[in-house]
Image: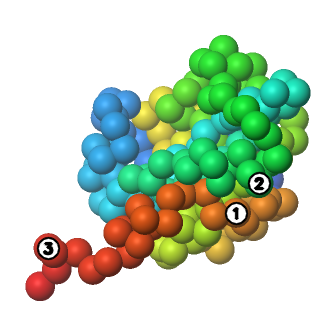
Amino acid sequence: MLTAAEAYLIERGIPYRRFVHQQPPDDLEQAATERGQRLEQVVRTLLFRTTEGEFVMVLVPGGFHVYWPALRQHLQQRRLTLATEEEVIRVTGYMPGSVSPFGLPAPLRILVDPHVFAVEEVSLGAGQPGVAIIMRREDLVAAVGRFELVNLVDEKQARKAAKPSDNIG
């Protein structure tokens, strides 16, 4: 059965591949390995609540953490919190761990860290535990539609990730 995220992509003619894990992965590293990807190719889709009770969706690459001061500054908020499990389900229609920026019940403000687009192919939640959407970055841009491109990761962490791996060669 297709998820709302997949139906959204099909309606718009946006290509993607469906990946089904044998069982939901325990963490992003396992998800990446099973999908034949590197950690930074797995996009984390996070939901934050502002002090006004509004919600903002944030996309960052796997292995990166949101740099809270940058997020607060961009949103001009002194206080932000991660949405609770109940809020995630109510606002997105998806279970935590399978959240997708596609097929949402209502439009959300979406912020994307530019490091998400540093790779040719990404994967992200399909809206169902253990199921992922794999797509090219160009298709991700088309599918998300309106979003704000914002540096949301700690630059030290980003520079470290950009260094060549010691495992190459």
Hey, which residue is sitting farthest bottom in the picture? 169
Is 69 rendered above or below residue 160? Answer: above
136 vs 161, nearest the viewer: 161
Q: Is residue 125 shown to the viewer in this render? A: yes
Residue bearing mark 3: 167
Q: Which residue lies furthest to the front in this view?
A: 78
On screen, residue 88 above or below 63: above
Question: As shown in the figure, which amino acid type bears the numbered disc 1?
Answer: Val
User: Residue at image x 36%, y 68%?
Assistant: 161
| Residue type at numbered disc 2 | His
The CA distance from mark 3 to mark 2 is 36 Å
- Residue shown at 66%/68% (left/top)? 139
Residue 18 disc label: none
Residues at badges 2 and 1 in contact (C-beta under 8 Å)?
Answer: yes
Please give the count of numbered marks on the rendered protein: 3
Q: Which of 82 and 169 is in front in this view?
A: 82
Residue neighbourhood size for the residue with mark 1, other residues' Cα within 10 Å, grouped as few (<14), some (14–19), many (≥20): some
| Residue 65 as seen in the image, left or right of residue 105 | left
Residue bearing the label numbered 2 = 74
Q: Give the residue number, with chain letter if any, for mark 1.
A: 150
